[in-house]
Image (cartoon, helix red, strand yellow):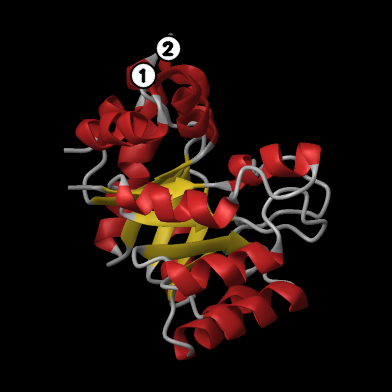
Amino acid sequence: MTKLSVNINKIATLRNARGGSIPDVTQSAINIQHYGADGITVHPRPDERHIRYDDVRSIAKVITTELNIEGYPDKKFVKLIEEVKPHQVTLVPDPPGVITSNTGWDTVKHQSFLSDVISHFKSLGCRVSVFLNADIRMVKPAAQTGTDRIELYTGPYAEQFQHHPEKAIAPYTEAAQAALNNHLGINAGHDLDLKNLKYFKQHIPGLLEVSIGHALISDALYFGLENTIAMYKRLLQ
């Protein structure tokens, strides 16, 4: 079964909107793993507008499921990975002011840079995934960096799904097959939800993990967090 990693950035956003410690981000991570999630994803950004670096340190000490830390590998991020040594690091080409991740790496242009970062993180015992658009031209160069996996950026899929599901999924199926041909594991994330997740899962060979945050945390307002996690996991069976 494809694993579900829950991105808890939005829980931190809610806390930061009011200040203080409510909701408790670390306790939320504990609860989410208790409710059946296979992993916790966090994406700290330089301005710490949602998940803070200290949150990551706190979470890493107490959860027993996989910890996936996403981000751009600047000096501060690299230092955090060296300290925490998460199960997985997902490299994302975010410029500092971006609201949310909205594109994948150009693995041709940045191959040397990525290769150096990936080699360092793997030496720490971390699995590494590289955030990619559904573009087969980027898959083989990604494999040449030494990464273990790619994470397919599913924003464009989600945008097209409602009106043209076959057209929406086609480049992802193609990219996934190219990844398998290059001995890469396949993750996916961004705007996957209760409406489009099952179709995506059914058409992506070798899908190992999805990372879902905004939609899942929003659905929890209606259905409750424990029930929502169960609903998403059923779609991945």
Q: Residue furthest bottom?
A: 123
How crowded is the residue under tag 2: few (<14 C-alpha within 10 Å), some, or many (20+)? few
Q: Nearer the viewer, residue 136 or 123?
A: 123
User: Please, what is the three-letter code of the amino acid marked with disc 1?
Assistant: Lys
Q: Position of residue 138 (x, y in %)?
A: 50, 56
C-alpha separation, residue under disc 1 versus residue under disc 2? 9 Å
Marks 1 & 2, CB-CB < 8 Å contact: yes
Q: Position of residue 120 (x, y in %)?
A: 55, 87
Q: Position of residue 109 (x, y in %)?
A: 66, 65
Reading the image, the residue beneath label 2 is: 162
Q: Residue furthest top?
A: 163
Q: Is residue 76 above or below residue 103?
A: below
Q: Position of residue 103 (x, y in %)?
A: 62, 44
Reading the image, the residue beneath label 1 is: 195
Secondary structure state at the residue bearing disc 2: loop
Q: Is residue 200 visible?
A: no
187 with respect to 59 (left or right): left
Q: Is residue 224 above or below residue 206?
A: above
Q: Is residue 187 above or below residue 130?
A: above
Q: Is residue 6 visible?
A: yes
Q: Quadrant of the C terminus?
A: top left
Residue at coordinates 69% horizontally, 66% vertically from top-left? 53
Q: Nearer the viewer, residue 178 or 217?
A: 217
User: Please, what is the three-letter code of the amino acid marked with disc 2?
Assistant: Gln
Secondary structure state at the residue bearing disc 1: loop
